[in-house]
Image: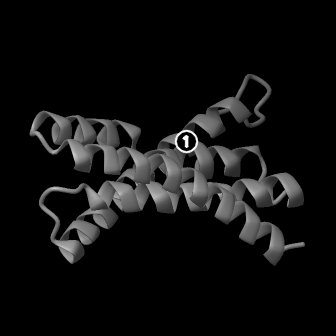
Amino acid sequence: MFDTTGTHNPAVINVLAVAVGGAVGSVLRYLASGLAHGAFRSTTFPIGTLLVNLAGCFLIGAGSELAESRGAFGPTARAFLFIGLLGGFTTFSAFSNETFNLFRSGSTGMGWLNVGCQLAGGLGCVWLGRSLAFLAWR
C-alpha cells in the first residue's frame, strides 16, 4: 500500500476502493433483487434485475452530475462508488442471461419487453438522476 518513499500509492488505494465497493454492491444487488422478486412474485419476468439496474442507473446519473458539476467526489470516492459499488450493484450479465432464457423458453414477448425496459428505463433513469441532482444542487 505504500511506495518506496512511504507515501500512499493512489493506484493501489483505488484498486482497494473498487474491490470493497464491488463486494458491497454485489451483496446489495443480491438483497435488493431478492426483495423485488419476493414482493412482485414474478416467476417469468426478471423484475429484480430490472429494478436494481434502473436504481443503479439513477444513482450513477445523480452521482456523476454531482461529481462533474460540484466536484463532489475525489478519484478514490469515484472509484469506490461508480466502478465498485454501482458496478457490483448493476448487472448486464444477469440481464443478458435472463433475456436469453426468456427467448429460449418461448417467451419472446417477455424477452423483448425486458430488453426495452432495461435500455429505455436505464437511459431514462440516468437522465432523471442527472436532472434531479442538477436541480437540487444548482
Q: Is residue 10 above or below residue 81?
A: above
Residue, x 74% and y 22% (percent of image)?
4
80 or 103: nearer the viewer? 103
Residue 30 seen by the camera:
no
Query: Which image quarter: residue 73?
Result: bottom right
Query: Where is residue 55 shown, x and y percent of the image?
Result: 49, 62
38 or 118: nearer the viewer? 118
Residue, x 73% and y 71% (percent of image)?
132
Colour basis: one colour
Query: Which image quarter: residue 105?
Result: top left
Query: Where is residue 115 shown, x and y percent of the image?
Result: 38, 44
Q: Quadrant of the N terminus?
A: top right
Q: Residue furthest top?
A: 4
Residue, x 64% and y 38% (percent of image)?
14
Query: Where is residue 79 shown, x and y percent of the image?
Result: 64, 43
Query: Which image quarter: residue 101?
Result: top left
127 or 34: nearer the viewer? 127
Which residue matches tag 1? 18
Residue, x 42% and y 54% (percent of image)?
117
Q: Is residue 96 above or below residue 28?
A: above
Residue 114 seen by the camera:
yes
Q: Residue furthest front?
A: 109
**In-image side of 66 versus 19 (left or right):** right
Question: Neighbour class for label 1 at 10 Å: few (<14), some, many (≥20)?
Answer: many
Q: Quadrant of the C terminus?
A: bottom right
Query: Looking at the picture, which amino acid does disc 1 mark?
Result: Val
**In-image side of 44 versus 23 (left or right):** left
Give SS at disc 1: helix
Query: Where is residue 78 shown, x and y percent of the image?
Result: 69, 48
59 or 27: nearer the viewer? 59
